[in-house]
């Protein structure tokens, strides 16, 4: 067995969840998904496809209809993009891994901005790349910021790939347009590829960009730029368990990615692709409502946490998480486990996302019923009062 595989850490989020799964009365906020089911019309589209007997292989890169639907969807949000630059993957995580498999050789240098979903630093490491991290830094109020000089100084001609997740999991930090332009210009000079994990782009509450969507590299990159942007149906279409995502690639790259899909999954299931295509065609029936509701959830939870003595938290411009500190509780994993067992609240430990997340906790606020957030904070406050 490869040494790098043996050295991979098991998920600390799963470690906390395993301590709580099956325990009666635990409120789970640990995973990055809503507790609301996929809309009925999307589920019905998959059922109809199965009833029609569409149970066979499809093109490696995805059904032409779905690739076209993704291209049209992305073109409405950003610059026009053609379907031949789109590849369908078995979820956003598969799309990200495909990008790493396409670009990285053993020994290549990769720079990643952290804290971040741990898959994004593990995937290049699995390929044998050397991962260097540039950390976001929290201000006095708990809002995380990027030191652009530090990032641009870290990305040199030796850097094969820069990995960015914005809006960010877990902090909610989001790149500005000016920062993206500076990063793209710098990477053009160094010859560095950009892998942009933009699965949270629609979960944006800044309201200062086109269609309320977070700034995207697809807004500014030309078709020849070394930029791969990854999208997913999971977050903004309530389709986490369906496992369908995509890569938006430079011109001429899709055939190579298609070969890798063959060796990974062969293709995504047809009935899932049919449902995804319909969801994208009817996105205005789904996503605006979801985003508006999540905005309410964010504002409610942040207000309640800010009113809780000893808690430091800021309202992030994007994503579906509150990332916060509790005064005096510096061991995130131990605190998260205690909250499961002693308070019945399931949160993710911040050090699951990077060492600099130690002492922080992530709370997914994507709750269909806002009263669950009230109950969760009440349990937290009661637990904190018992610690005195």
Image (tube, grey):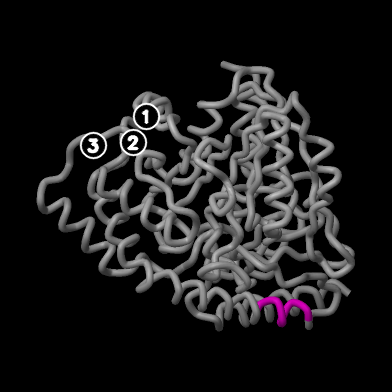
Query: Does dot 1 land on a helix, a strand or a loop?
Result: helix
Q: Nearer the viewer, mark 2 or mark 3?
A: 2
In this rendering, position of residue 183 left or right of residue 318: right
Tell me the crowding category of disc 3: few under 14, some 14 to 19, or many 20 or more residues within 10 angstroms, Cα based: some
Where is mark 2, residue-wise? 61
Quadrant position of residue 155: top right
Q: Which residues are magenta?
A: 301-306
Where is mark 3, residue-wise? 58
| Lower position in the chain sequence, tag 1 or tag 3 | 3
Residue at the image point whose x is 63% and y is 17% from the top: 106
Residue at the image point whose x is 42% and y is 48% from the top: 81
Camera-nearest residue between 120 and 2: 120
Asked if residue 88 is positioned above or below residue 204 in the image, the reply reads: above
Where is mark 1, residue-wise? 258
Quadrant position of residue 363: bottom right
Q: CA distance from mark 1 to mark 3?
A: 12 Å
Residue 212 in view of the camera: yes
């Amino acid at each position: 067995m490869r040494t790098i595989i043996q050295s991979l850490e098991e998920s600390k989020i799963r470690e906390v969840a395993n301590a709580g799964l099956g325990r009666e009365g635990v409120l789970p906020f640990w995973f990055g998904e809503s507790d609301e089911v996929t809309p009925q019309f999307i589920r019905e589209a998959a059922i109809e496809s199965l009833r029609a007997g569409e149970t066979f292989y499809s093109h490696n890169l995805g059904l032409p209809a779905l690739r076209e639907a993704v291209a049209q969807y992305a073109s409405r949000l950003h610059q026009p993009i053609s379907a031949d630059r789109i590849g369908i993957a078995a979820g956003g995580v598969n799309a990200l891994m495909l990008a790493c498999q396409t670009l990285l050789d053993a020994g290549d240098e990769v720079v990643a901005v952290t804290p971040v979903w741990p898959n994004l630093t593990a995937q290049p490491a699995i390929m044998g790349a050397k991962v260097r991290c540039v950390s976001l830094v929290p201000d006095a109020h708990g809002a995380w910021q990027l030191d652009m000089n530090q990032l641009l100084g870290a990305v040199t001609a030796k850097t094969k790939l820069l990995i960015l997740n914005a809006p960010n999991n877990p902090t909610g930090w989001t790149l500005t347009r000016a920062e993206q332009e500076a990063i793209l210009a710098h990477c053009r000079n160094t010859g560095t590829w950009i892998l942009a994990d933009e699965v949270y782009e629609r979960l944006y509450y800044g309201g200062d960009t086109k269609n309320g969507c977070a700034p995207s590299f697809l807004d500014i990159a030309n078709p020849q730029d070394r930029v791969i942007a990854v999208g997913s149906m999971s977050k903004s279409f309530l389709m986490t368990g369906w496992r369908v995502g995509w890569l938006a690639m430079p011109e001429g790259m899709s055939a190579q990615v298609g070969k890798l899909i063959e060796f990974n999954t062969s293709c995504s299931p047809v009935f899932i692709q049919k449902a995804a295509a319909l969801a994208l065609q009817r996105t205005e029936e789904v996503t605006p409502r979801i985003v508006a509701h999540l905005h309410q959830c964010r504002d409610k939870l942040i207000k309640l946490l800010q009113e809780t003595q000893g808690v430091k938290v800021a309202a992030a411009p994007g994503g579906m998480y509150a990332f916060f500190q509790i005064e005096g509780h510096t061991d995130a994993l131990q605190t998260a486990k205690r909250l499961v067992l002693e308070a019945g609240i399931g949160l993710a430990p911040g050090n699951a996302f990077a060492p600099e997340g130690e002492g922080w906790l992530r709370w997914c606020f994507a709750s269909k019923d806002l009263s669950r957030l009230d109950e969760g904070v009440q349990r937290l406050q009661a637990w904190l009062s018992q610690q005195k």
